[in-house]
Image (spheres, rainbow, N blue to C red):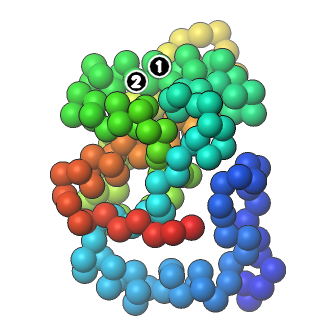
Amino acid sequence: PYKGIGVWCAVHTIPMYSKINKKYLRMINPEILNKLFDEYDIVAGKKYNLRCIDSNYQTPADRMAEPVMAGEEGRIQYHKMEKLIRELHPEYISELEEMNKTCEHYLCNMFVAKKELYNECCEFVFDILLRMLKEFKEKDEILLGQMRTLALLSEFLTSLFISKYKREHTNKVKELPF
């Protein structure tokens, strides 16, 4: 029943499954996942380095500033996100600085976690995103690009959560290849 189902990716430099196949179905098998969660609390894809797309990127803000992403507004919003993290969640500053230095992060908000951790992640991510959304709403109109920017920023926020958890709980995050 899964034959021919594919995954489309706008950025062809990012490795993605081209279709759902037997290998993929084995990986998402509940028995295998249950065994993984006997040992790990979070399962995610390997971190991806944005410099594989463009070696000139100095920080993730440079990626956000690309016209195909959010343009210069994306860079501005990335820096607003950084400011909110520094003010409201200083426990994430070391992960933020590391991500800015290495340009590595977990892609597409795709991970599996124990329920409590998933809820913690959502609390952190949406605390920042909802504050940013409130600022957008205070303006006369919300542009589609601004909403897309929030979605892109959520990837970086999720990455910060996973990275912090990995630092604090050695060997409890499993990274799988794409």
Give coordinates of residue 47: x percent, y percent.
47, 54
Q: Secondary structure at mark 1?
A: helix
Name the quadrant containing residue 40: bottom left
Q: Secondary structure at mark 2?
A: helix
Which residue: 66% across, 43% down?
53
Q: Which residue, given by chain and number where applicable, does mark 2 sit on?
A: 82
- For the image, the number of numbered tags is 2
Give coordinates of residue 153: x percent, y percent.
52, 35
* Left or right of residue 94: residue 62: right
- Type of residue at label 2? Glu
Determine contact: label 2, label 1, CB under 8 Å: yes
Q: Quadrant of the C terminus?
A: bottom right
Which residue: 20% across, 60% down?
170
Q: Residues within 10 Å of mark 1 (few under 14, many from 20)?
A: few
Which residue: 47% across, 46% down?
105
Q: In the rendered view, would you say 142 is above or below 16?
A: above
Q: In the rendered view, would you say 159 is above or below 43?
A: above
Q: Which residue, given by chain and number where applicable, does mark 1 sit on?
A: 79
* Left or right of residue 119: residue 9: right
* Left or right of residue 145: residue 46: left
Q: Which mark is residue 62?
A: none
Q: Quadrant of the N terminus?
A: bottom right
